Amino acid sequence: MAAVAAIIAAGILVLVFWPEQPEEYIPTVTTMPVTTQDVEIYGEYPGSIRAQQFVEVRARVEGYLEKMLFEEGTYVKKDQVLFIIDPRQYQAKVDKAKALLKKNKALAMKAERDLSRIRPLYEQKAASQLDLDNAIASYESATADVMMSEADLMQDELTLSYTTVRSPISGYISERHVDIGTLVGPGGQSLLANIVKSDTVLVEFKMTDLDYQMSKSRNVNFGQKDSTRNWDPYITITLADKTVYKYKGLVDFADPQVDSKSGTFSVRAAMPNPSHALLPGQFTNVKLLLDVRENAVVVPTKAIEIERSGAFIYVLRSDDIVEKRFIETGPEIGNNTVVERGLFRGERIVVEGYHKLTHGMKARSI
């Protein structure tokens, strides 16, 4: 009996002092489901503003500038009279051309009457062939002189019209480049003023070859309409005070070749400017919509880790087992990153506490 009691006592001691087995460590992590969304991809470039039309108003005839009929810096309409050049010498040429035309018309009428008298006489053998030929020649020469006089008069009247300088377009006119009384025209200063049409402006910028090639891979042809996509490559610009201009511009031209020296190519967009807030010559920052990724997988950038083998993310499977998943990343959008390959909608990814994880372990999600 003593032996049995000793054995029982020893067993109790073993149970009491047997070391406890450690519980399995299950880390707690924060997860979120993988979602998809349409992602807009932008590029940013320095750009400059150019007027839709910039026209130089020049004197086409020589003379002394007599009048200026506009206020500098104001809006002028097409065909509005801007300057008057002394027209007297050109008016005299017009008057002379009119007189010469009148004279030649009179001679032509006389030659026509002479021919009308000679022709019946020739038919009656009362006039010679030479008389008829001379009459015909005189009539045709007089008729040609009338045509030449009409052409000279038209040219002189056109030259006279150039003494009244009109606006070729509607727009804002610059200050005058010459003073009243100055000799202008071919022998003098010909540039009188500039007119800028800026109801719509052109925004010019240079796009990198890399962005261009990436866009081409997505079948985005700048400057060309594409019915296969439901978006257009528009731009927004940032003004000098860091505010974003309220209107958007649409790319309407892209240079067909790349500058081999800079590795860029020129792009242009038309931008509405109804209030004339944008001035030609301004520099600005251009933000261009390069692409729209439809139903793209987007995850927080902080959930992605990088090692020598590539980028990876921890996925918590339905059985709460952690999987180290290598992924192919795309562009970053704010605090998120597009995942091109490796993840699927609905999967759970670890966004907090991933530093405690290893592949194949179990984790608890909160």
Image (cartoon, rainbow, N blue to C red):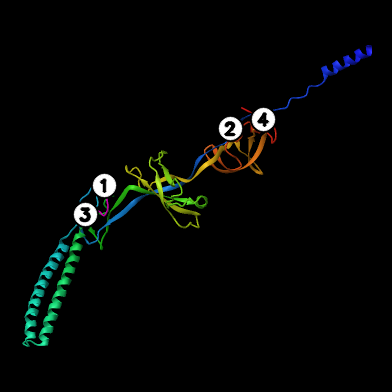
Q: Are marks 2 and 4 in contact (CB under 8 Å)?
A: no
Helix, strand, or loop for circle 1?
Answer: strand
When the figure is inspected, residue 312 is found, relative to residue 3, above or below; the finding is below
Tell me the mark number nearer the camera, choosing from 2 and 3: 2
For marks 4 and 3, give the CA distance.
85 Å
**Disc 4 marks which amino acid?**
Ala
* Residue 342 image point, x, y percent: 61, 42
Query: Would you name the residue on which mark 3 appears?
Result: 83
Residue 206, visible in the rendered structure = yes
For marks 2 and 4, give the CA distance.
14 Å
For marks 2 and 3, give the CA distance.
73 Å
Q: Quadrant of the C terminus?
A: top right
**Disc 1 marks which amino acid?**
Tyr
Q: Which mark is residue 75?
A: 1
**Disc 3 marks which amino acid?**
Phe
Query: Would you name the residue on which mark 4 appears?
Result: 363
- Per the rendered image, the range of residues in magenta is 166-171
26 or 83: nearer the viewer: 26
Q: Quarter-wise, where is residue 156 in the image?
A: bottom left
Q: Are marks 1 and 2 in contact (CB under 8 Å)?
A: no
Helix, strand, or loop for circle 3?
Answer: strand
* Residue 318 image point, x, y percent: 64, 33
When the figure is inspected, residue 32 is found, relative to residue 213, above or below; the finding is above
Q: Which of the marked residues, 2 or 3, is nearer the chain's N terminus? A: 2
When the figure is inspected, residue 45 is found, relative to residue 27, above or below; the finding is below
For marks 3 and 1, give the CA distance.
15 Å
Q: Quarter-wise, where is residue 248 in the image?
A: top left
128 or 208: nearer the viewer: 128
Q: Which of the marked residues, 4 or 3, is nearer the chain's N terminus? A: 3
Query: Would you name the residue on which mark 2 appears?
Result: 32
Q: Which of the marked residues, 1 or 4, is nearer the chain's N terminus? A: 1
In reply to whether residue 170 is colored magenta, the answer given is: yes
